[in-house]
Image (cartoon, rainbow, N blue to C red):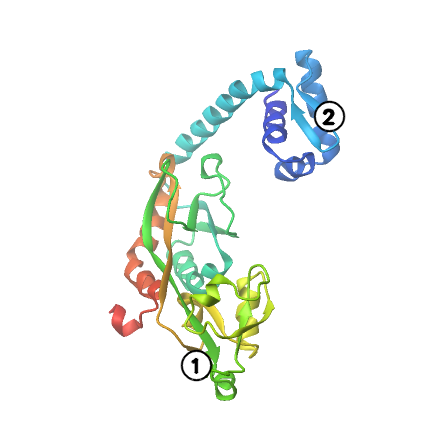
Amino acid sequence: MNWDDLKIFLAVAEAPSMRLAAKTLGVSHSTVSRRIEALETALAVRLFDRLPDGYQLTPAGEDLMPAATSLDENLHAFGRRMTGRDSALKGQVCVTVPDVFAISFFMPHFFDFMQEYPDIQLKIHDSFEVFDLSRREADVAIRFTNAPPEHLIGRKLGTLHQAVYATRAYLDQHDPAAQNSTAKWIGWGQPEDHPSWIKSSPFPHLAVAGHFNNIMIQFQACKQGLGLGYFPCIQGDVDECLVRLSAPKPTVEVWLLSHRDLRATARMRAFRQFVIKRQSLLEAALEGRKQAEAA
């Protein structure tokens, strides 16, 4: 039995569609189909029923899943242990972090780390998705969560706070506190007449101007003078064009996460300690405290 065929079997079994399985594996749809057929031929059994809406495991496929999953986990665990023996301050550290966090706060720290450790190459994934650290899709995850996975080792870096922001020019033309104010919110999420986040805001009487599903687009819309925005303090406080209009409000915890099998890796330990040494500065930025207050 070919291990590569088992990898493809697992990807198809776990993915919602053949297309997504092929994308995850980095191969073509036809390659996935051909390898599944080869595995079925080798085992002399049908593992999937081909249905109009995708592949569905047969009883034989269900029987194969525990063995394939166990073998996959054992191989990944072995790889992590081998990586954990690396004592040299060189190689790659893959970090997954939301784009707004990377751009608004971490970019200068990434630069400083690479200056201090020139033989360690940072690979940054700007994503909110949960990368599988057990399968080495990333080495370190910086995540917004109040419930980090128990199988990962982590350090709480602080709590993300958000506040209301607008440009000075916009406030000169629109008083958001006025009863009949012409000020408007920059909308996000699903379009609603009176969304709950506005009802609980300092300006619940204001209407919404448009809806944008990306925080970086919302931020640019605010800077262009479209309306009031509700942003993380690490984003709004660093832009001189914006004025903060409300007290920072806590929203979600921020964690630095990695797999416990990699804790002995020198480059991983160096990156974690580099971030942790800056925790007080990070906490202050997350909470919207000024640098003087942080000191």
Report the amino acid beneath label 1: Ala
Q: Residue furthest bottom?
A: 172
Which residue is at the front of the view, 83 or 210?
210
Res 86 visible: no
Q: Is residue 230 above or below residue 275?
A: below
Q: Residue furthest left?
A: 295
SS category of the residue bearing label 1 = loop
Q: Residue furthest top?
A: 44
Residue sitting at 47 percent across and 26 percent down?
A: 73
Residue 50, label in figure: 2
**Residue 150 image point, x, y percent:** 36, 37
Marks 2 and 1: in contact by CB < 8 Å?
A: no
Quadrant occupied by the C terminus: bottom left
Residue sitting at 42 percent across and 63 percent down?
A: 105
Q: Is residue 5 above or below residue 276?
A: above
Q: Is residue 186 above or below residue 141?
A: below
Q: Is residue 114 left or right of residue 207?
A: left
